[in-house]
Amino acid sequence: KLIYATTAIVLRRLHAEPDLHSIGCLILDEVHEGDVHTDFLLLLLRDALAKGKLKMKIVLMSATLKAEDFCAYLQKVNKTPLKPVYIEGRMFPVDEYYLEDAVEWVSFATDTMKGSKGKSKGKGDLARIEEKKEQALQKLRTSPATKGRDFGYLAIDALAMWEPRQAALELIEELIHYFHKEEPKGDGAILVFLPGWGDIAKLYLTLYQS
């Protein structure tokens, strides 16, 4: 049986089943990302291997990791020598675009441009928003990726109001429609990375109903 699970779920499984006797092979993908769950899981697995609790095979995978570092980390608790396996892949051209580009492609307006649905903003709030806009403009003017380029008020407003920990689902929805209609690339798929199942479900439902 093949089980797909997040590292957090594997950690809970390890807590309930310390020797993971029901698992024959554990594959951890994208281990180079170094998030808290992955690092903690590697620590627990290494400790369990040192105590001889684990009898399963462990495979660490990533397209960018420095394999020798992970081998050295686990070699001290492994009875047999560890040797990385390299699989050649194909390289494809990649064009880089940023939030300000996406906003201008679809003429996306943030809530401040659409008008607030709640209370009217006071002078203090408006002053803070204008200050954020000025900071966003300075970043656009000084950043190596955007220096010398001209951006409209939509891009400046979007950067000023951007929330790093909040997925901009409305913008993502408009981008998907834009790529599908205006920038068709054959029969390929559009891959979207989202932080959690809640955002995935919301976006799926929105796209399904659109």
Image: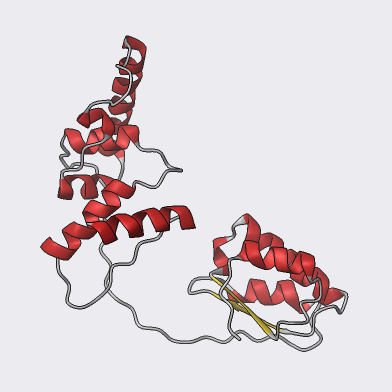
Q: Could you tell me which residue is drawn at 21 percent across and 30 percent down?
A: 113
Q: Residue furthest front?
A: 209
Instruction: Please say whether residue 96 is visible from this viewpoint.
Output: no
Q: Quadrant of residue 49?
A: bottom right
Q: Could you say where residue 3 lies in the image, as x and y percent from the top left?
A: 59, 78
Q: Could you tell me which residue is drawn at 24 percent across and 59 percent down?
A: 176
Q: Could you tell me which residue is drawn at 49 percent across and 71 percent down?
A: 64
Q: Could you say where residue 161 lies in the image, as x and y percent from the top left?
A: 33, 33
Q: Could you tell me which residue is drawn at 25 percent across and 44 percent down?
A: 100
The C terminus - image quarter:
bottom left
Asked if 178 appears above or below 122 in the picture, the reply is: below
Q: Could you say where residue 58 lies in the image, as x and y percent from the top left?
A: 68, 81
Instruction: Please say whether residue 125 is visible from this viewpoint.
Output: yes
Q: Is residue 206 left or right of residue 107?
A: right
Q: Quadrant of residue 76?
A: bottom right
**Front-lying residue, 83 or 22:** 22
Q: Quadrant of residue 28?
A: bottom right
